[in-house]
Image (cartoon, helix red, strand yellow):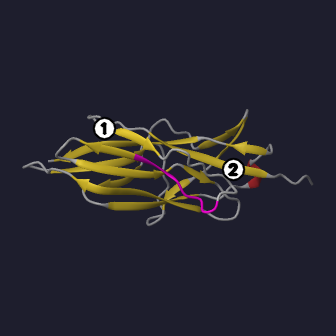
Amino acid sequence: MKKKMIALMTTLAVASTATVTAFAVPNEGTVINPTTDPKTGSTAVLFDSGDEYYEVIIPAQVVLSTTAEQEVSVVAQNVRLRQPANGAKFIQVSVSQNNDFNVYNGSDSFEYSVKLKNSGKPLSAGSGVLAFDHDDHQEILFGTVDMDDVHAAGNYTGNLTFDITTEILS
């Protein structure tokens, strides 16, 4: 039986759908791969309208594993929101609708899974990851890779895109 050596990597990208301008500020020069130790790095989305401010930090890359789920944190920090007189304002981070939860190596691909750590709830396109009106965080888990799903050796990459929106409950 042929031994398959695979470096599996999926890249987390950030898309902002806030109704006001937000800036994605990636950490320049941070590259995470199977030999990086420690495996850290992030992409920050900053929003500053003068009287409101928040930062959402999402890991820039995740290395998938055949032996253990990979845990990453989505973090909201330095949150300052002005609450409306009638209702509650919060920021929602969710998995974008255009995700297919696959990584690719040329024409070969396989599906991966993602779930919320605290509830075990699987994430799918449109799923909420974190809703916040103050500093908060949420751990998500990337499932293990079943080698029976992998057909070709090599690097598999893909994007997992998140939406960040402002919501007001009345």
Magenta span: predominant SS is: loop
**Residue 8 image label:** 2
Name the kind of residue labelled 2 in the image.
Leu
- Marks 2 and 1 sit apart, C-alpha to C-alpha, by 32 Å
Give the left or right position of residue 1, taking residue 70 as reference. right
Measured as percent of width and height from the top left, residue 122 is found at 50, 55
**Residue 18 image label:** 1
Measured as percent of width and height from the top left, residue 52 is found at 20, 47
Q: Quadrant of the N terminus?
A: bottom right
The answer to whether 71 is drawn above or below residue 125 in the figure is below
The answer to whether 89 is drawn above or below residue 71 in the figure is above
Q: Is residue 42 magenta?
A: yes
Measured as percent of width and height from the top left, residue 24 is found at 40, 40
Identify the element where label 2 is drawn: strand
Q: Nearer the viewer, residue 43 or 97?
A: 43
Name the kind of residue labelled 1 in the image.
Ala
Q: Residue at x 91, y 52 (%)?
A: 2
Query: What range of the chain is rendered magenta?
Result: 37-44
